[in-house]
Image (tube, rainbow, N blue to C red):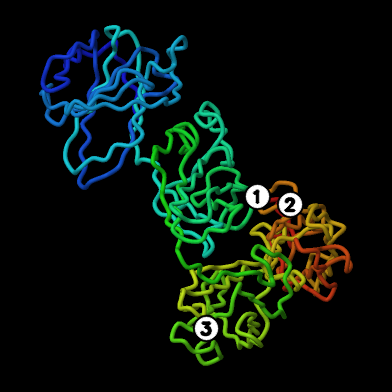
Amino acid sequence: NHLADLTTEDDDWDQSTFTYPDGEEHSNGANGMDYTYKLTLSEPATIYITTCDSETNVDIQIAVYTADCDESSWILFQDDSNLEIYYPDGTSEQFEFECISGFESNPTYANMLPLLDWDAGSYYVVVDDRAGGTGTVRTWFGYSLIVDSTSTSGDFTEVNYFFSEGVFGGDYQDVYNGNGIGLDTSDYSVEINPNGGNADQANLTSLESVTGGALAGGEETVILNLEYPNTPSGGEILTVGPASVSSIFNSVGVPLLDIDGISISLIDVLAPTIEFTDPENGAEEVPTVSNIEVKFTEAVRHFNDENITNVNASDCFTIENAETDENLTYSISTPDNLTFTLNPDGELPEYTYIRLSMLATIEDQNDNAFVFDTIRFRTADETPPQIQSSSISSINDYVAITFNEGVYSTNNGSGGLDATDLTYTFNSNGGNCDNISVSGLTSNTGSNLAGGESTIHALISLSAAPSGVETIIFSPADNSSIFDAAGNSMSTGEISDEVTLLASALLISTHLADSNE
């Protein structure tokens, strides 16, 4: 973005008239001082331009040209954000864009162009003060917010929206000021054309994130949950899109301009879908020794018309560590080709997101392919925290203790440790320092502990300068002193590395010569 002071600029472009429509002169009625941006695209791009900004304090009009200082090369013109966008082919379009500007009496006296599909080349973007040059204008450029792609669940009760960047809902002014919220159902429009099919209504019941949680704003993937009062029989056309041009925004308040939405043809023969899984999608605290059960809405098989067995199961199901993408092996069994039990080989990794993918190689008995689907769940944290390492500071004023995970003083994942949660053993080993004390605990940045730190500093005070042979060992004060986020307590048998104090210079003796020299 850039702020231009039009009080110091010249009038280089005449925007008082445009050849519109059909090459005829069309009076715009105003012209003033202007500022030009040359935008060069090395490849085709979809971009936005807006002057909606609190520092735009004049009545701005905007035009775009393809040749320097050639007013006949204009390709679009807009006066205000909520007025027409004119094109030289005689067409125009108008949207009720919301806008904020420093022109307080008329905040729409700025410009909003959220979706410009331009080829590679050079473009001259000219912002012009209709009043003659009496203030400033801030112009923003960026890539447009678009829908990169969409996908659906097998029964079309989920539509997954994949945006080009994080999206926000709420009032435009809140989004502009950085207070956007998550999208809600009122931000979308859902319609269905029966087209001879059974379903004549689709209801948007909720939105959720890719992990199944509520939307907070900034998500790049949004899942729309739908229900159909009448089950689709095939042939229906579902259309989903933003409720208006002021429904879905990027982080600076530029809206998603997708008037037509996306259209999805419901298949004429329903594919098999998942009736339930155990664990459910989004489940937490799943034991590491667990089978996974999947039940389909109808009997299924491998796409080559064979039953699903241990021989071909990996073509149909994959179990992965979702955090590392590591494949986890398993065996499979089914009594009826409807319900399948996947038995992992060994324990699942603890406190880890596991992804079960059900692949499109699954089909029903009528050759209707299953639509790829996944569930995610997280295993339980079953292992207590451990001391990973310890070391002395360079001036012997603290011992850094590092744990293998964040630690807390209570079993509900809250509270920072204090000095009473640790005990220590000090050995002077014949050195000059015969005693130490622990005066407190801090984070590795020196601040008070709040809980969840994986590295802490135990502050120590020495009774004398050390010789470099004295050692310290730390351990939990008891079995109810140190916990991880899941409430697992550290055992008193967990002991830190032995830390040796660093030798300090000390005065061994003094001597005064007989001559006092």
Distance of label 3 from label 1 (alpha carbons):
58 Å
Residue at which label 2 appears: 442
- 192 or 108, which is in the foreground? 192
| Amino acid on which disc 2 is placed | Thr
Q: Position of residue 182 (x, y in %)?
A: 58, 41
Residue at which label 1 appears: 445
Distance of label 1 from label 2 (alpha carbons):
8 Å
Q: Pointer 1 and pointer 2: residues touching (CB < 8 Å)?
A: yes
* Image quadrant containing the N terminus: top left
- In the displayed structure, would residue 59 be above or below residue 377? above
| Amino acid on which disc 1 is placed | Thr
Looking at the image, which residue is at 59% across and 48% down?
A: 207
In the image, which is nearer the foreground, mark 3 or mark 1? 3
Query: Who comes first in sequence, dot 3 or dot 1?
Result: 3
Looking at the image, which residue is at 47% across and 40% down?
A: 242
| Amino acid on which disc 3 is placed | Arg
Within-10-Å neighbours for mark 3: few <14, some 14–19, many 20+: many
Question: In this rendering, would 228 be left or right of 14?
Answer: right
Question: In this rendering, would 466 be left or right of 72?
Answer: right
Q: Position of residue 495 (x, y in %)?
A: 78, 73
Q: Where is residue 117 in the image (x, y as percent from the top left)?
A: 27, 40
Corner quadrant of residue 504? bottom right
**Residue 249 seen from this side:** yes
Q: Residue 301 carries which label?
A: 3
